[in-house]
């Protein structure tokens, strides 16, 4: 009996000591994880800002696919929220502040416990990627959470791996979404023609994007300085295309309503695209897929015994990438002038 009492006494001391140890643990915690994602800040921000996307990349839902998710009418932006229920209980999350494409602040609450603060930041890199930082912290940690954290090795080890897996899944989901593209042969149609201001240069596959950016930058400066109204979306006329060595001579232009007189010493000229019959092809997707779109268009011409005319083929970029952060939504129209038998 004395031995039994002694064992009970030791157990009580152990329990009291453990509870005391847990109780004196800090009432606050902070977990931070970062990942560099090959996408624009605006695209990643849009995914994180809408709670309806979380189900597709949440590591917690991946581990507990039977989690019941409830979405209110508003799921994105300030005031957007969602809630869940699983075998651990219920929880909810709400966006309380947001700076578009830069940061998001959210409040996450389990049951009736004090909520934790969640913040996201999206910092662009010099090479067009984004450093994404996911932070969660709380300063009124209940005893039960402390207990679970102690046996898990601390909050960082308990939550950190889920952050890492969530960021990994988010990265994969976003990058995969940017690779989607579609090529559509719209058929033979009439292009109405019009004037355009342009600059001509040569380029190759490795620097064509850089050259285009420089060209359009100069053109925009010119029309702004001279108060010239633009009459449409940017275009590129291909004066020469060498598919064997991947080089082109191109004229990058901006449509205008009338002929513009340009000084002789300027490297900008005013040209005219005539009204003509064309084969129209549309690429919906990143400009890096334009080579495939041209191949499809030229194959269509060959398979249908169509004949190109002497007029130069051209592209029109019908939406602004600045307004569409996902390259999968960029739209380019390809026009190949044709000889049409009367």
Image: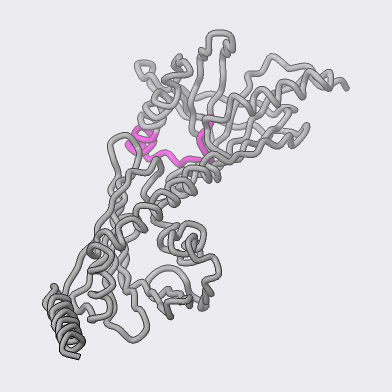
Nearer to us in this view, 90 or 225? 90
Residue in view at x 78 percent, y 31 percent: 188
Name the image quarter holding the C terminus. Answer: top right
Q: Position of residue 80 (x, y in %)?
A: 42, 73
In the picture, measured across the screen, residue 61 lies left or right of residue 164, that is right
Quarter assignment of residue 1: bottom left
Viewer-proximal residue, 21 or 264?
Answer: 21
Is residue 36 depicted above or below 201 in this figure? below
Q: Is residue 2 above or below residue 45?
A: below
Dividing the picture into quarters, in which one does residue 152 lie? bottom left
The stretch in magenta equals 220-235
Q: Position of residue 116 (x, y in %)?
A: 27, 74
> Does 61 appear above or below 132?
below
Residue 299 drawn at (x, y percent): 74, 21
Left or right: where does residue 275 sit relative to residue 122? Answer: right
Q: Residue furthest front?
A: 1
Residue 35 within the magenta-colored segment of the rendering? no
Front residue of this view, candidates 121 and 249: 121
Q: Residue 221 magenta-drawn?
A: yes
**Residue sitting at 52 percent across and 30 percent down?**
288
Residue in the picture at 39% in, 53% down: 165
Q: Nearer the viewer, residue 226 or 25?
A: 25
In the image, farthest residue toward the right = 342
Give the answer, above or below, for where 80 lies relative to 326: below
In percent of width and height, residue 65 lies at 54, 65
Say which residue appears at 78% left-offset and 18% top-offset. 302
């Amino acid at each position: 009996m004395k031995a039994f009492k002694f064992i009970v006494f030791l157990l009580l001391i152990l329990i009291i000591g453990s509870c005391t140890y847990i109780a004196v643990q800090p009432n606050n915690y902070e977990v931070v994880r970062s990942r560099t994602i090959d996408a624009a800040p605006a695209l990643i921000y849009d995914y994180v800002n809408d709670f309806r996307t979380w189900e597709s990349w949440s590591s917690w839902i991946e581990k507990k696919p039977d989690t019941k998710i409830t979405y209110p009418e508003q799921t994105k932006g300030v005031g957007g929220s969602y809630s869940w229920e699983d075998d651990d209980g219920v929880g909810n999350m709400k966006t309380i502040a947001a700076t578009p494409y830069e940061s998001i602040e959210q409040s996450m609450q389990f049951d009736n416990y004090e909520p934790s603060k969640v913040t996201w930041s999206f910092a662009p890199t010099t090479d067009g990627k984004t450093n994404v930082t996911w932070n969660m912290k709380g300063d009124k940690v209940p005893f039960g959470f402390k207990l679970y954290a102690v046996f898990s090795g601390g909050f960082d080890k308990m939550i950190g791996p889920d952050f890492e897996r969530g960021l990994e899944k988010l990265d994969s989901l976003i990058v995969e979404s940017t690779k989607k593209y579609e090529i559509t042969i719209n058929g033979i149609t009439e292009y109405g023609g019009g004037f355009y201001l342009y600059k001509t240069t040569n380029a190759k596959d490795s620097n064509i994007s850089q050259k285009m950016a420089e060209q359009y930058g100069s053109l925009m400066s010119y029309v702004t300085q001279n108060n010239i109204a633009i009459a449409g979306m940017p275009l590129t006329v291909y004066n020469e295309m060498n598919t064997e060595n991947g080089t082109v001579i191109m004229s990058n232009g901006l449509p205008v309503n009338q002929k513009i007189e340009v000084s002789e010493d300027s490297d900008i000229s005013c040209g005219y695209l005539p009204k003509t019959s064309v084969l129209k092809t549309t690429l919906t997707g990143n400009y890096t897929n334009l080579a495939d779109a041209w191949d499809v268009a030229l194959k269509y011409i060959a398979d249908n015994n169509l004949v190109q005319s002497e007029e130069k083929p051209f592209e029109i970029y019908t939406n602004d990438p600045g307004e569409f952060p996902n390259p999968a939504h960029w739209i380019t129209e390809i026009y190949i002038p044709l000889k049409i038998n009367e």
